Amino acid sequence: MKDTLKHRGKRNQLAEILVTKGIEDKAVLAAIRAVPRHLFIDSSFEDHAYQDKAFPIDADQTISQPYTVAFQTSLLHVKPGDRILEIGTGSGYQTAVLLHLKARVYTVERQLSLFKKTSLFFKKMGYRPKKFLFGDGYKGMPEEAPFDGIIVTAGAPEVPKPLLAQLAIGGRLVIPVGVADQTMMVIRRSSERKFERQSCGAFRFVPLLEDKN
Ligand code: SAH
């Protein structure tokens, strides 16, 4: 598990590509330059780590495309110390980007194999989310609400109501909504009862699965 000058060079190139694709947020770009994405995927596929592409991880899931991670993170408007809930930990790459922005991160994963693998990886790397839960992200994390931001990294057929309820006033939910492909939605809670919605383009994610039990 090494991070070398060569890897850092590739990350700088990746950040430049994201700039050409419209990512402007300096703090987000700094996080992309800092987080060693190659360590989040199987080492035999290391060469793929700094291409702007999604990639398979365990349990038929994917590590999101760097552009998507950067775009969703920009939409969250993270400030240091913000309480951010992430649904769909997966490889932990998005989690690490949020931690680099000095957010207090709460994250949920429903695939046990990924939960175990990523828990060990976080310990090994010294990444410290405030809470890493094995469970159903549809329900959010009511015991830790309210959140300044909630990011969903799987395609949701509809916006889960518990997530809206767990947003702080002024907080934002960034969620891809749709079945076959998704529209990136930003939902800002402007008051107790008022939610402002904005559509931010088309994406394709693995599905957000609901636990029926
Ligand atoms: N942020 C991750 C994305 C992984 S893909 C990364 O970049 O690596 C989406 C993840 O959401 C998968 O790991 C999948 O298992 C998880 N997921 C799907 N439905 C979920 C649910 N209801 N609750 C929590 N996680 C869920």
Image (cartoon, grey):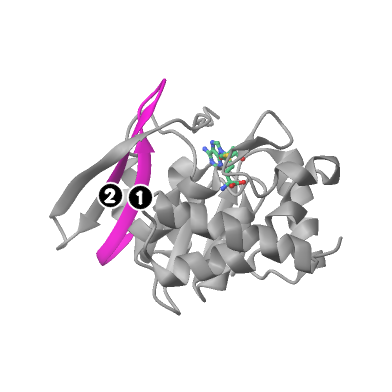
Span colored in magenta = 167-186
**Residue 197 seen in the current view:** yes
Give the tally of numbered discs: 2
Q: Which residue is mark 1?
A: 174
Q: Residue at x 45, y 64 (%)?
A: 84
Which sits in the foreground, 69 or 140? 69
Figure quadrant, ligand 1:
top right
User: In this rendering, would 194 be left or right of 173?
Assistant: left
N-terminal of the two: label 1 or label 2? 1
Q: Is residue 111 left or right of residue 32?
A: right
CA distance separating discs 1 and 2 = 5 Å
| Residue 52: image location, x then y, percent | 57, 44
The verdict on residue 85 being magenta is: no
At x 68% / y 55%, what residue is drawn? 37
C-beta proximity under 8 Å, tags 1 and 2: yes
Query: Mark 2 — residue?
Result: 186
State left or right for residue 211 relative to residue 188. Answer: right
Q: Main secondary structure of the magenta part?
A: strand
Amino acid identity at mark 2: Val
User: What is the secondary structure assignment of the residue under circle 1?
Assistant: strand
Q: Quadrant of residue 75?
A: bottom left
Q: How far from the left and from the top, in percent, is residue 44?
A: 85, 41
Task: Pick the residue in front: 118 or 6.
Answer: 6
The reply to whether the magenta stretch includes residue 172 is: yes
The image quarter containing residue 79 is bottom left
Q: Residues within 10 Å of mark 1 (few under 14, many from 20)?
A: many
Q: Is mark 1 within 8 Å of ligand 1?
A: no
Q: From the viewer's perspective, is residue 198 above or below residue 10?
A: above
Image coordinates of residue 107 in percent, x first then y, are 56, 56
- 158, above or below 90, in the image: above
Circle 2 packing at 10 Å, graded few (<14), some (14-19), many (20+), is many
Identify the amino acid type marked 1: Val
